[in-house]
Amino acid sequence: MGNLLEMINLSTTDSKLNKISEKIINNERLSFDDGVYLFESNDFYSLGKMANYAKNKISGNKVYFVLNRHINPTNICVLSCNFCDFAKKIGDPDAYEMTPEEILGKIDKDISEIHIVGGHHPTWKFEYYENIVKEIHQKFPHIQIKGFTAAEIDYFWRRWKIDPEESLARLKEAGLASMPGGGAEVFSPRIHKMLLPGKSNSSRWLEIHRTAHTMGIKSNCTILYGHLETYEERIDHLIQLRELQDHTDGFLAFIPLQYQIGDTHLRKNKISPIEDLKMISLSRLMLDNIPHIKSYWVTIGESTASVGLNFGADDLDGTIGEEKIMHAASASSPAGLARTKMISLISEAGKIPVERDALYNEIKTYAY
Ligand code: V47
């Protein structure tokens, strides 16, 4: 094995790291202790090589992106999670509510995915959301709708007594293609108590994704990292996701979401790019059964996200925001601009850009 480690350039002077590399080469599952050891190791370079090796075994040299649009119908939320800058109360000058017409007006027909996530609104009925999905699906049948976190699905039960089986069946019937991974935060009960009292807990989050997978609805999963959680709590979170995936095979992608300090200030300074890259690498290595890992440029920035493509990630996501300035100076559509940017970030990382839809069907490969 020593020779094989050297041949694929994974050999280090740390025998414990070499043992972990051997497991990766032999497709053996990493343990909780392996994960914590890798997080604590200073051999960041070897960690990246291991994660890139594991990524190459799954998706070769490809890196995916999607032309998508995030729609957040309202920021009014009954919860007050301590990490969230988005939520507002009714009457707050920054609170907003979008009408279905406003939502339809924000959609560019050239995109492949719409991501819908919003606050837990105190009075909006479930039918409002069902109707939004129906209207988008009718007007843009070619765009896949990825919508509603498990926390929102749980809220439809708590607020309107519509259980997850029913809400998911009705949303699917209206045109929902898949579910995003938000609302998971960190499964640790310690963190849950400190940061999100009142929000659906980890077992409920996992149960709702299990239900969705059983109903044929694929979903994503996330972790919110870089605040008060420990390495142990991160690894435990990853292992809980891995265990559910063993049963359902319904997760498409995992997205590590770096905590943005904003006005909530759970920590003084933003964590370092090295920590972001460690998180991406550990996600790839621990989640051996989840096909895709995102390097989510919206939270870690374009530069770190591009480096993340050599630390185990195989997806850049691709959010098209309300880009107006560049668009005014160019004949290209916002979707066209987003596509060019994604292709160049991926190519610069030495990978092959592949445009995908929400369900990871490949739309086009861009040779470079
Ligand atoms: O669940 C809230 C997070 C999530 C903050 O499934 C924060 O493809 C950082 O889930 N700093 C929603 N994050 C976003 C989300 C997502 C994003 C992109 C792709 C996908 C996908 C899902 O945003 C929430 C929460 O974890 N969040 N506040 C904050 N201050």
Image: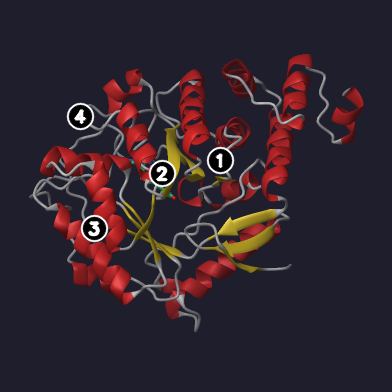
Give me the residue at 44% from left, 35% from top: 223
For the residue pair 101 and 297, the one nearer the viewer reads as: 101
Disc 2 marks which residue?
213
C-alpha gap between disc 3 and disc 1:
29 Å
Q: Residues within 10 Å of mark 3 (few under 14, many from 20)?
A: many
Disc 4 marks which residue?
198
Sequence-wise, the earlier of marks 1 and 2 is 2
Quadrant of the image containing the N terminus: top right
C-alpha gap between disc 1 and disc 2:
14 Å
Left or right: where 108 falls relative to 138? right
Residue that extends furthest to the right in the rendered view of this protein: 3
The image shows residue 49 at horizontal and vertical percentages of 74, 36
| Mark 2, secondary structure of its residue | helix
Which quarter of the figure has residue 267? Answer: top left
Disc 1 marks which residue?
290
- Give the amino acid type for the residue marked by disc 3 in the picture: Pro
- Foreground: disc 2 or disc 3: 2
